[in-house]
Amino acid sequence: MKTLRLRIHGRVQGVWFRESMRREAERLGASGWVRNAPGGSVEAMVQGSETAVDALVEWARRGPPQARVDHVEIEPIETNDLFSGFEKRIG
């Protein structure tokens, strides 16, 4: 099980980034959450198989068609907590 915290920078708020990421995570079988962060970035916690998590990171580097992703910060997380499903959080 692989867990990463992502911080996605660019034009990523107000462009359906969170909902698109939720749908992509569900399609890939990843779990976790995504939310808007202060300063206009988006933060996500992503967990799943290495294949699913890596694929979602690659998706996050592009985002949905309306987004412009400038940079993705990636932080590995050591945790025993398991997420169930993938949720879009408010703020």
Image (cartoon, rainbow, N blue to C red):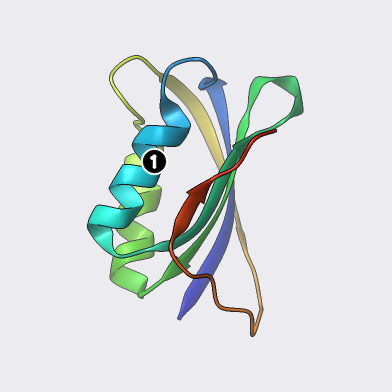
Q: Position of residue 58 (x, y in %)?
A: 33, 46
46, 9: nearer the viewer: 46
Q: Which residue is at a point 35% across and 34% down the rendered structure image?
A: 20
Residue type at mark 1 is Met
Q: Position of residue 56 (x, y in %)?
A: 35, 52
From the viewer's perspective, is residue 68 above or below residue 28?
A: above
Count the labels in the image.
1
Residue 34, picture quadrant: top right
Q: Is residue 34 left or right of residue 53?
A: right
From the viewer's perspective, is residue 4 above or below residue 14?
A: below
From the viewer's perspective, is residue 53 above or below residue 37?
A: below
Quadrant occupied by the C terminus = top right
Q: Which residue is at a point 40% across and 18% down the rendered structure image?
A: 67
Residue assigned mark 1? 21
Q: Is residue 59 left or right of residue 75?
A: left
Q: Which residue is at a point 41% across and 34% down the rendered structure image?
A: 19
Q: Secondary structure at mark 1?
A: helix
31, 68: nearer the viewer: 31
List the single residue furthest toward the bottom. 80
Quadrant occupied by the N terminus = bottom left
Q: Which residue is at a point 43% across and 16% down the rendered structure image?
A: 15
- Characterize the local packing of mark 1: few (<14), some (14-19) or many (20 or more) Cα atoms within 10 angstroms: many
List the single residue furthest toward the right. 38
Q: Position of residue 49 (x, y in %)?
A: 35, 75
